[in-house]
Image: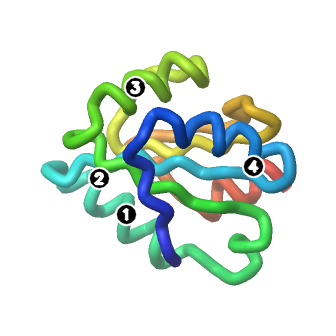
Amino acid sequence: MDFKVLNNINQLAEIDELSKRKKQIIFKHSTRCSVSAFAKKVLLSEFSDDMEKVFDVYYLDLLNYRELSNKIASRYSVHHESPQILIISDGNCIYDASHDDVSLTSAFASVN
């Protein structure tokens, strides 16, 4: 799986626009957290070609982009968590999960 790096607040408008045609995933990751490292491993192990047809996956290093992480929380009306996965469809967050619940399999099942 190739993560698209999310590091600019202007990318949120792009994600919203793309989400009108294909669901977009935002994975908020803390590089200093063992739970977050485990969640990243889960995402990488669960990813399949079928999912690539349904999702684009963005990766946010929230320690380096804290302001962007906060903007995501307010823009999509979710509580800030880490690790956290959000699914954006038609410009709205339709699914979010955090900590041990971060899973592409669960996310994929919830939107299909």
Q: Is residue 40 above or below residue 93?
A: below
Residue for point 52% across, 77% down: 1
Which of marks 1 and 3 precedes in the sequence? 1
Q: Which of 5/107 is in front?
A: 5
Disc 1: which residue: 40
Residue 19, how many percent across, how many down? 76, 46
Badge 4 or badge 2: first in the primary sequence: 4
The residue wearing badge 4 is: 18
Identify the residue position indicated by label 3 in the image. 80
Q: Which residue is mark 2?
A: 36
Quadrant for the C terminus in the image: bottom right
Task: Please tell me the numbered disc located at residue 24.
Answer: none
> Which residue: 78% across, 64% down?
54
Snapshot quadrant of residue 86: top right
Label 1, label 4: how far apart the Cα atoms are: 23 Å
As rendered, which of 2 and 7 lies closer to the eye? 7
Of the residues under marks 2 and 3, which one precedes in the sequence? 2
Identify the element where label 1 is drawn. Answer: helix
> On the rendered structure, is 7 left or right of 12?
left
Q: CA distance from mark 2 to mark 3?
A: 14 Å
Q: Secondary structure at mark 4?
A: helix
Hey, what amino acid is under mark 4?
A: Leu
